[in-house]
Amino acid sequence: MTARFPHLLSPLRIGGIVVPNRILSSGHDTVLARDGAVTDDLIAYHEARAAGGVGLIVLQVSGVHESARYTNHVLMATEDACVPGYARLAEAVHRHGTKIFGQLFHPGREILESKDGTAPVAWAPSAVPSERFHVMPRAMTESEIREVVAGYGQAARRLREAGLDGVEIVASHGYLPAQFLSPHVNRRTDGWGDDPEGRLRFLREALRGAREQAGPGFAVGLRVSGDEHSHDGLDTALVLDTVERLDAEGLLDYVSVCAGSSSSLSGAEHIAPPMFRPAGYTAPLAGKVRAVVGVPVMVAGRINQPQEAEQIIADGRADACAMTRALICDPELPAKTAEGRADEIRACVGCNQACIGHFQLGHPISCIQHPETGRERRFAALPLITRRKKVLVVGGGPAGLKAAAVAAGRGHEVELHEADRRVGGQVLLAELLPGRAEFGGVITNLEGEARRAGVRVVTGSRIDVPALAATAPDVVVLATGARPRRPSLELMDDPVVLDAWSVIRGAEVPRGRIVVADWRGDWIGLGVALRLAGQGRKVTLCVTGFAAGEHLQQYVRAAMLAQAMRARVEIVPNVRLYGADADTVYLQHTLTEEPVLLEGVAAVVLAQGHTPVTDFDVDALVLEGVAERVVAVGDCVAPRTVEEAVLEGLTAASAL
């Protein structure tokens, strides 16, 4: 299918390296490193993407100095002892024809955590605080600056010795090199600041050191944010001037362009932009960089499909596209593209839950649609079946679809029954909320996988115990989901009380002030509030936590809260719903237990979580001989999220 994707599937020369195609996995943390070193899990993770045909893998950041440990799970390239681990990783990737680069990194003031819970001393050009992590750094001394600059060259040499093909200096997202470049952050009056030439010095010397110590034939690139979108960040004009000057000096083999900054909530959203951002929205920034440099330009920013990447390259805005989250979701994306199976690609929906969301919680990387990611050593090669079994799956939500797809893929005879006219479960509700239409792709992908695996999908079919017995299955997988929880409330004078599901489905909501009572603090309460506000309603969102969207990944939460602010949604934190009458909602403060009354209310919308649908008794089904094995997965076990549902479907089917 090279004819369909002639640009994307063509090779690209970067310095002395030839990359087999223009699809790359850009640097991203995996939480698979341990004690600063490469692990078997990290090797398996990247080898899966190399086996899937990606042209270039850029590893997660490698610290160049001991002060660069911004998390407990950063890779470190500060000692020669790191070389064997990187060498094993490079060998695993190279045997599939993929090239591999390392990222050379220092966070400066952007420190997330420490080894033991005590706050570390953060280094920066000047004592200017980071707004997002509330870190007040210490201005680096001359000797400390020289130590860190030397670390870039020493780390590049080690990665070259390990057999990597190149390195990329991270000057993006407001990290240390960008802090030196910024007149807002770098307030030094010595030779490392004071004027544009002084502010460029740190990055220039780091690049020179990397080139000199790594030697010829080794690619040295630069990652920059084309715009940091932050009040104290770099703007596009300064970035363009920087890359143009460095390229003119022969210091660059390529430039990798992204957007955003770690230093502010508004800037950080662009590090892993959620689905509210359009596909490929950073391509214009890359195009501006490409216009002023003579080396290849890569771009990252919500590029999920090969046709999007092909168009960006064909339009001359970039020479290669980072499809990082797309590859987390589907490691075989490049191979499927090359083999004419692009319609089988499991498209990323930009939910951020198990990729960047896991990292920010300190958990290994994964994907809500593809929980095999990050668990390659556990699920990459499922055991061969010893007997073909008849498997009946009850429920066509994410858990049921994943269980059916995996079981059929392993060779079992699988039939799935869904009571509604469409499979999908709660995902069909999520996709109806403002800015979340893309989330419906989860079901499109899972249903496609199930049907291609040979699953017989029967919709509009409500299964009961006699029907189960009549089919005589060997295995029953119960994935019957959950229903809205309606707590016990004190209600007087017949108030209008609706559940979030009915509102999303279009139930009539009276005019006037609407109170959304949100127990969980996830996408439902915020999403319903945005939907109603978009209809011109005055909305008050009452949450039991400290903030709305408390359980959402922080970039998704930031985007939704920004929308709520613009829509004039009133947010009342730390309250639980107690009752209501015809025009008043009665709440209780969760900290003081004092009453909180909201008057002039036309209706209350409940986003109070879910209760499991337990229409079947697992033990009874086995005892009555309906099936030799019955397993429950997803929300019917305990209401949670799509991530847990899909993982449990995979786990159950893997054990059949």
Image (cartoon, rainbow, N blue to C red):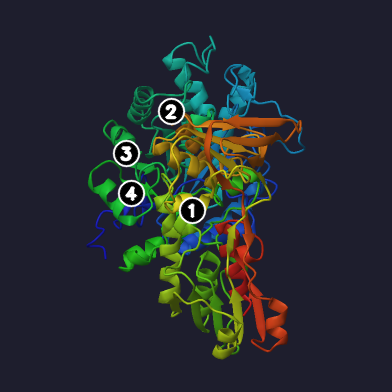
Amino acid marked by disc 3: Val
Question: What residue did someone put label 1 on?
Answer: 502
**Of label 4 and label 2, which has the lower sequence position?**
4
Where residue 174 sits: x, y (%)?
A: 51, 29
Q: Distance of mark 1 from mark 4, alpha carbons? A: 55 Å
Disc 1 element: helix
**Of label 1 and label 3, which has the lower sequence position?**
3
Is the residue 641 above or below the residue 406 in the image? Answer: above
**Of label 1 and label 4, which has the lower sequence position?**
4
In this picture, residue 443 sits left or right of residue 542: left
Query: Residue 13: which disc?
Result: 4
Question: What residue did someone put label 3 on?
Answer: 295
Disc 2 element: loop
Closest to the observer, 427 or 34: 427
Is the residue 533 above or below the residue 402 in the image? Answer: above
Amino acid marked by disc 4: Arg
Query: Residue 438: which disc?
Result: none
Residue at (61, 35) in percent of width and height: 547
Where residue 654 sits: x, y (%)?
A: 60, 75
Disc 4 element: strand
Q: Distance of mark 4 from mark 3, alpha carbons? A: 9 Å
Closest to the observer, 464 or 13: 464
**Of label 3 and label 2, which has the lower sequence position?**
2
Q: Residues within 10 Å of mark 1 (few under 14, many from 20)?
A: some
Q: Distance of mark 1 from mark 2, alpha carbons? A: 38 Å
Amino acid marked by disc 1: Ser
Query: Residue 229: which disc?
Result: 2
For the residues bearing labels 1 and 4, Cβ distance under 8 angstroms = no
